[in-house]
Amino acid sequence: MITFKPKQVTKKLLTAIGERARDVLEKRYGLGNDNETFTLEAIGQTYGITRERVRQIENYGISTIQKSAAYTEHAELLAELQEAIRLLGGGVVAENVLLESLTKDESTRNHLYFLLVVGDAFYKGKENPLYHHRWFTEKKVADVVEKALKNVHGTLNRDDLVSESEILTRFRNELIEIAEKHDDETLKRWLLISKQIAKNPLGDWGPSDSPNVRVKGIRDYAYLAVKRHGSPMHFKEVSKAIQDLFDHKAHVATTHNELIKDERFVLVGRGLYALTEWGYTAGVVKDVLREILETEGPLSREELIEKVRKERYVKDNTIIVNLQDANLFKRLSNGQYTLTD
């Protein structure tokens, strides 16, 4: 994407300033042989000066470079970097995405970052609670993208998970006038600017602070596995799915214990778990029978069997046996069942 070697360019640019200013910039941006970056305080201690004085030297060095012949000589190369930002993000791109796209070498990234700081065509949006560090050359585009990202987050409930195509559709609807000018790949890179929206290991999107996105343990992996499966699973199947989908070791017993303790799951059969969000009622078969009769009134045995089977993976005879509990249920003269008064 760029044809020049960043280290060679920064070396040329640094010749435009004095030794101390050059040393300060090399330390601040990790341009030395060891690639180590230093704080203002650390550099100040080296020279016996205040951090504010170091900042002044840093700003002076950058300003001097921008006015130098070396800067003018390499203007075309900086224009290449500007074009890279346009190609990657239509004029705005997350800092880590930009640097990782241009080089895999960590030390070279330090030099690229320095060129972004020095180049007068580049502007940095600093990290805040809503967005990661990002660079832009088009302020209007950056403003539209950031507002759209905030609005997309507003369409998501905390536990929502949506497909990539759905999140892109919502994003396009918010981008309005600039949406048609950019392809899906650009929009995906823009999504990475947001701190509020993120993608989970299975490629679904949601709020970044949701356990369905920021997966931390067996419970969260189990939730994603069962949700991906789309129907109740035995805890042994869940354990295997976690290992297959996420390459994360999940002992069967541990998985079972986590499913029992998590309110996102409901036991619907012998060792079978469904997601509570699918509408299953918690409790044993008697609890399900009681809730159905409380809600709908007297029902025949066949009607009760049909409704319970939608809630539990049990045999008909198990339902019939539970109906015989005279402390909870009674059979009416017309053959229907109701709750005991």
Image (spheres, rainbow, N blue to C red):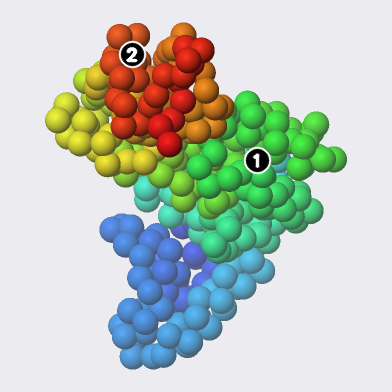
Q: Is residue 73 visible?
A: no
Give percent across and percent down for residue 103. 45, 40
Label 2 vs 1, first from the N-terminus: 1
**Residue at (49%, 37%) from the top-left corner?**
199
Residue 61 in the figure: left or right of residue 190:
left
Marks 2, 1: nearer the viewer:
2
Q: Gap between marks 2 and 1, in whole Å? A: 63 Å
Find residue 320 and name its label. Answer: 2
Q: Amino acid at mark 2?
A: Ile
* 26 vs 335: above or below: below
The count of marks equals 2
In the figure, residue 311 lies in which quadrant?
top left
93 vs 21, nearest the viewer: 93
Identify the element where label 1 is drawn: helix
Q: Circle 1 sits on which residue?
A: 89
191 vs 60, nearest the viewer: 191
Q: Please rate how many residues cluster around mark 1, counting C-alpha atoms within 10 Å: few if below 14, some from 14 to 19, many from 20.
A: many
Q: Quadrant of the N terminus?
A: top right
Give percent across and percent down for residue 277. 48, 33
Give percent across and percent down for residue 230. 45, 19
Q: Amino acid at mark 1?
A: Gly
Give percent across and percent down for residue 68. 63, 66
Q: Please rate how many residues cluster around mark 2, counting C-alpha atoms within 10 Å: few if below 14, some from 14 to 19, many from 20.
A: some
The reply to whether the C-beta atoms of the residues labelled 2 and 1 are less than 8 Å apart is: no
317 vs 163, nearest the viewer: 317
**Residue at (43%, 85%) from the top-left corner?**
51
* 132 vs 169: above or below: below
